[in-house]
Image (spheres, helix red, strand yellow):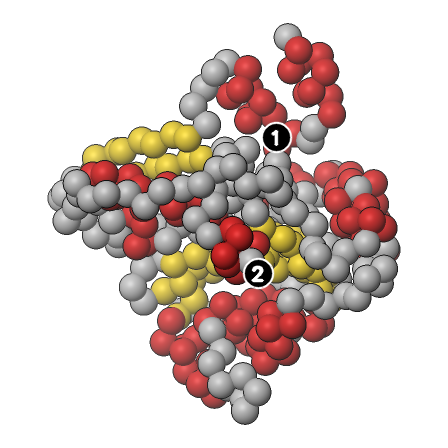
Amino acid sequence: QYIDEHIQPLVPDPCAPTLKQMEHKEALFRTKVVLLPDQYACIFIGMSHILGDIVTYTALMDQLSSLHDARKPRPIKWNNAKQASHQISAENFSERDTQVMYGLPFLLGVSANLWRKTNREHEYLSLSKEKINAKRKELCSEENSSLSSNDIITAAMCEANKSSDIFAFTRTMRELHRKEYKDMGGNLYVEVPFAKTAGSNPNDFRQLIKRGWYYDKNELPLMPFLTGKVGRITSCVAPVSVHMAFGESETVCQEPPHDFVYMTPFDNAVIFTMDHDHIGVMHNFQEIDKSGLLGEIMA
């Protein structure tokens, strides 16, 4: 009753399932196995964001795999004082920047996009690992001798997107502060906004990753957030096959949760490992043009 009367009115619709899970004491970490013919199976795994981020998720997967194989699981620490209920603001953010990205301007932009939510296309793209690796070698520069597949795909999606002005990439505090945050569970990641044009070139995006931020303090533009022209491109919600191995089983295909793009009223793309030869991208872009780099790496 307290949740219904006092908490529910304050949160957006995507949070409602978690609140209902808490209210009805449903498990915030759930697994289900569906057996298929020819010794195949589907494993469904769901973890509420209230427990932690993708690093926490993969750590739990590793623990389950270790217990299944009678190995000692690697411990997870849960008592970090800086652990956030959702995410931690970027270290170079001012109070004004935080309010622009997560406060009223962002909420107004989300509201402006709500009426388009049901009209958004939800599409899966199949990308060729062979073509991505070839493009990676072709575009490597003296400054960036080791472009990643993620650099190529992120740049391709930024270039192809025609409906947002700002995107964000994700950094985990575990990378920024390895000693302090090592083996920590919970939500310990930072979303770093950048101009879409700055991410449309793989070498520029790699330099942006190395720098760690794009906008200086108090320079985060207001209008893209007010008009809802902001989006996310991430690989941080996709399962990692090494954490999905149980006994002699082999992961042949994997897919992130569809709700990650279906329930968000702004441009969102998720990069994930589809199978041995393909990388997948699940997206809900309002407008997309596949004629550039994206078209070159599609399977």
- Does residue 241 appear in the picture of this structure? yes
Q: What residue is at 32 percent from the left and 50 percent from the top?
A: 243
Name above or below for residue 207 compared with residue 271: below
Q: Position of residue 21 (x, y in %)?
A: 51, 21
- Looking at the rendered structure, the secondary structure element under dot 2 is helix
**Residue 281 visible in image:** no
Screen quadrant of the C terminus = bottom left
At x 44% / y 41%, what residue is drawn? Answer: 77
Above or below, 41 relative to 267? above
Percent across and percent down for residue 104 are 83, 40
Q: Nearer the viewer, residue 97 or 298?
A: 97
Count the marks: 2
Residue density around tag 2, few if under 14, some if 14–19, many if 20 or more, within 10 Å: few
Q: Inspect the image, locate mark 2, and give the three-letter code of the amino acid beneath it.
A: Leu
Left or right of 127? Residue 85 is right
Coordinates of residue 203 in the picture (x, y in percent): 59, 80
Q: Which mark is residue 55?
A: none
For the N terminus, the quadrant is top right
Q: Which residue is mark 2?
A: 176
* Amino acid tagged 1: Cys
Q: Which residue is mark 1?
A: 15
Do the numbered discs 1 and 2 sit on residues whose CB atoms are within 8 Å? no
- Secondary structure of residue under mark 1: helix
Q: For mark 1, does the 10 Å Cα neighbourhood hold few (<14), some (14 to 19), or many (20 or more) residues?
A: some
Of tags 1 and 2, the one toward the viewer is 2
Q: Quadrant of residue 144?
A: bottom right
Q: Image point 48% across, 37% down: which residue?
A: 78
